[in-house]
Image: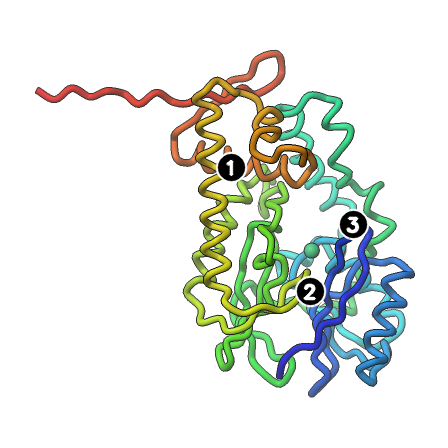
Amino acid sequence: MEPIQIELPTIFESMTVNTWLFKGPEPTLIDCGEKTDKLWDALINGLKINGLGIADLKKVIITHAHLDHIGMAKRITEHSDATIWVSEYVYDWAIHLKMMLDRRTGVIMEVMDKNLPSEIKEAYFKFGYDELADYWDEIPKDRIQVFPMEGSLNFGGDDWEIIYTPGHCINQTCFYNPKNGYLLSADMLLPIIPIPIIDAGLRPPYNRVKTLPMQLESYKKLKKLAITKTFPGHFSAFENALALIEKQENKIHVRKEKCFELIENGVTQVIKMVHQVYPNRINDATIFMVIGLLDILMDEGRIEHQEIDGLYHYTAIKKKVVYSQ
Ligand SMILES: [Zn+2]
């Protein structure tokens, strides 16, 4: 059974988010959008076109804990008997929202403090509880069902493999149907390269994890699957996932090399690299991306940084010349 796309509005300019509907055997949604009245109306309308109402919903399965995918879940529980299915890694976000947002904001601001002049920091990075809590509710514990990070889930009349794919989000899962090659890809596979949003690790001491290197590993994982059609969290369904993955891997590689070239030529600060790699596109997405590219270069042992006046400056590591006898 192919999922039905219901496209919903978001608070992010010009972006929409998908909920994917399986009408049977029990009405199920994959993700549910954020909590706004506008989205609620669009959801009711989308279900109505398919002969359903909110009260008919039995399951809502959440791919990852970002507000545009999970925010509306509680409101759905107030108007239906639906159970909200979240992964082990999403569970804390579902029941301790402020704690998790504070934790994430802490690591984002730590990175930004070391990498950006203060005026840039103030203009972006509205990722905290105060900015997001209006659109995102915690979910009542007795309405949650937790699923593991691997194994399978049954919905839409099929068993779907749970594929843990951190990168854009540290707790993100995709669902793959080996029978027909369908992939519900969340924000792991999109027609555009997903933003590697900075986040804290899953375990104490909850230090920052390197999300772009994780995204590259998740691409590798998906390349092993025989995907025939992809149903993403944003934009329309598409075929040929493999070509898209390779295109995105290549683009990341090219931009990483561009950063390295800049560093070799004496550009030491993140914001200057963002200006060069993404001209006229200075925003939180491009800043996250450049931080991610630098993470890869650090992992490759090609660059290092030192703190000068509170800001990191990046320099290339000179290769040691080894003389043979
Ligand atoms: Zn999203």
**Ligand 1 within 8 angstroms of badge 2 C-beta:** no
At mark 3, the secondary structure is loop
Image check: 93 left or right of 248?
right
User: Is the N terminus in the top left, top right, bottom left or bottom right quadrant?
Assistant: bottom right
Marks 1 and 2: CB-CB under 8 Å? no
Indicate the quadrant of ligand 1 in the picture.
bottom right
Mark 1–mark 3 distance (CA, rounded to whole Å): 24 Å
User: What residue is shown at x 49% (from left), y 46% (from top)?
Assistant: 251
Mark 1 or mark 2, whichever is nearer to me: 1
Residue type pointed to by label 1: Leu
Q: Residue 188 bears which disc, if any?
A: none
Q: Residues within 10 Å of mark 1 (few under 14, many from 20)?
A: many
**What whole-number distance in Å separates the C-alpha atoms at marks 2 and 3?**
20 Å
Between 17 and 172, the residue placed more toward the observer is: 17
Front residue of this view, candidates 60 and 257: 257
Q: Position of residue 93 (x, y in %)?
A: 72, 53
Q: Residue furthest bottom?
A: 25
The residue labelled by disc 2 is 62
Q: Is residue 27 above or below residue 234?
A: below
Q: Earlier in the sequence, mark 1 or mark 3?
A: 3
Q: Which residue is mark 3?
A: 12
Residue 140 visible? The answer is no
The kind of residue tagged 2 is Ile
- The first of marks 1 and 2 along the sequence is 2
Extreme residue in the top direction: 309
Give, as a three-letter code, the residue at label 3.
Answer: Phe
Q: Is residue 275 visible?
A: yes
- Asked if labels 3 and 1 touch by Cβ distance under 8 angstroms, the answer is no
Q: Position of residue 200 (x, y in %)?
A: 62, 42
Q: Quadrant of residue 86?
A: bottom right
Q: Kindly identify which residue carries mark 1.
A: 293
Q: Closer to the N terminus: mark 2 or mark 3?
A: 3
